[in-house]
Amino acid sequence: MKKDQPQSLSNSKDKLITRIIHHHLFMPIAGLMVVLLSNLITKPDFFMISMNHGVLYGNLIDVFNRGSELVILAIGMTLVTAASGGQDISVGAVMAVSAAVCCSLLSGGAASTNVLQMPILVAAIAGIAVSGLCGAFNGILVAKFKIQPMVATLILFTAGRGIAQLFTKGQNVYVRVDSFKIFGNFMPGIPVPTPIIISVVTVIVMAIILKTTTLGLYVQSVGINSNASRLVGLNATRIKFITYVICGLLAGLAGFISASRIYSADSNNIGLYLEMDAILAVALGGNLLSGGKFSFAGSIIGAFTIQGLTTTLYAMNVSADQLPVYKAVVVVIIVVLQSPIVQKRLRRIQMRRKSVKVMEEGGASA
Amino acid sequence: MNQMNKWVKTIAEKRKMINDTTFLILVTVTLFIVMYIAGMIIFHDQGFAKPQMFLNLLISNAGLIVIASGLTLVMITGGIDISVGSVTALVCMASAYSMEVMGTSAYTAILISLAIGLSFGIVQGYLVSYLNIQPFIVTLAGMFFGRGMTAIISKEMLTIRNETFRSWAEFKIYLPFGTVNKAGIYQPSYIYPTVIIALIIVALIVFMLKKTKFGRSLYAVGGNQQSALMMGLNVKRSKMMAYVLSGLLAGIGGFLFCLNTGAGFVEQARGLEMDAISSSVIGGTLLSGGVGNPIGTLFGVLIKGTIGSLITTQGTLSSWWVRIVLSALLCFFIVLQSVITSRKRQAE
């Protein structure tokens, strides 16, 4: 018995390591670490955070700040992906719609304004509500008419920016009012950028919803087997529909933050390429793009990884319209690794290696 | 035995569906004719009734016809390819760059275009068919990759001044009919060679789909992958070949597109994938696969073109209305398809 003990100890150590490696958040965190640490090598002051004029400054703060919209989008995208096994590619365009509605209401239809024509809260709610309608439209197509999610959302993906242009009459609407700018910049007296606060609040609210209601459980079961969930009495159609509405509402919120950041509604550029980032965040977070189980924490870490990657690439003088190339490559690598066929092959290689090892050990002991 | 009966039944079902497609195509053709005649009546004083107006539809959409036909092949197998717009932009930019900056001949530019289209098709096809990854994710990545590569080649707009290229782009083929303008001068109608190439390609694809073993296997794979596999078809290879062909046709179509615009720039052909998908769907291709015909797609493209010229002739509506109307039309047809399919399933 005693002879065996050291071995079992090393076994438990191995088990701990494998348990860490196989934890669903291991890969996302490892990815984030790689991105952040690679920055540290090229830029030693990357983790420096300083106070300037009463607000926090630093590269890390910048990543979290710029990543706020992405975190909010990634939450909605995670739900949609989990429930329907497809992605909502209209989120970027819906952001533009929300920004357009909000800004054109605030400016009262003019191209630029220095005076608010409406309380900000009303305009923001209107923008987010219209985005919710966009989400409901996607939801009806996907849940009720059973159209593949990406085809259904492709409609708003292309038409969305056109609709946004209709609201702003084809121009960039500027709202040059300080009280509007705070949502994308800083609140007076608070050193943390407002977008970070909004995103943290959103995450907490969603976490509470998931903890207190059965939504999360239902979403997973619908995503794993829609028919079986229907047979046990879940309204699969309604659950899918709800996830798309939530995704639309969150996209609207992200659009509002984006608009406040640049205090204008630029229909052609707000949320451009962000749908790709959101999908990437979900995939990097270890969630299967084919639906089923999901992890918010993973998606959020994924979102920061993507934002870190974006910041890194910008620092390497890659321009905004060249970024998609690198992200596309990352997406392809992730989905290839996630693909069941590749995983089966990898597992077979692992098994072979293990069996060779066992055989060698067996030979040695004999 | 029971299972066998089921397969036979589904195959028979699909055959009935294909007959339904001829009906769907008829709906599309009628829609096109009604729209066009309505345009002729409303805008008769703005030249809508002239034959050249119709030929212009073909001229400005020659590239799209080829691209959408290729996409139809992929959609018949039940897949989708949303990278075609970016491939077009990349092809235009690469052609422009090779001719204007590197100084190669126009023939080399054609080869480069074909190579780009083919490589997109091979990579995406492999990932979709052999690694079983969702076509939408793969081609979404392809879409962003293509657009980004275009920006990497050049952020400036490159206008093509190559003489051979220009002589191709400006080569008019006059037709034996025409109109007399206000000054009383006879103006023969003309088309560009791009139109003829596009129509020949559509004819070839129709022949391939209807008469060759490969063409039939595409329908079989899209109709019911399981039964196609049981019949001994190489499902993976058929799917892969559909993507390769679609990529190649996107390369050809991109070059035709380039002949029409004569330049390469980053924002080129943005949303073209949407035009191609909606043309295909309006033309009767089922998104679930197994049903489709490039003739229908051709009319889908013509409907898209007619919407565009109706809106530009009208004058006061802004250009983004084209895409909004087209999206609405696509939405309508998708819902129609979904209703028809679910009713069929219920009837069963």
Image: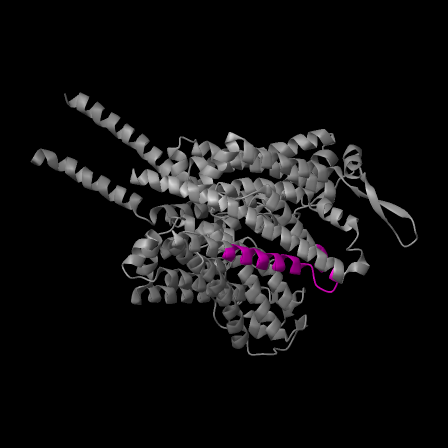
- Range shown magenta: B309-336
Vertically, is B52 above or below B160? Answer: below
Which of the pair B95/B251 is nearer the observer? B251
In the image, residue B321 lies in the stretch drawn in magenta: yes
Which of the pair B284/A199 is nearer the observer? B284
In the image, residue B55 lies in the stretch drawn in magenta: no
Which of the pair A218/B66 is nearer the observer? B66
- Give the image location of residue B96, x and y in percent: 71, 38
Which of the pair A318/B240 is nearer the observer? B240
- Give the image location of residue B103, x and y in percent: 74, 31
Tell me if A201 is positioned left or right of B270 in this view: left
Is residue B307 visible to us here?
no
Asked which quadrant contains residue B152, the reply is: top right
Asked which quadrant contains residue B161, the reply is: top right
Vertically, is A64 above or below A323? Answer: below
Kindly identify the residue that appears in the image at 27 percent across and 42 percent down: A17
- Give the image location of residue A142, x and y in percent: 45, 57
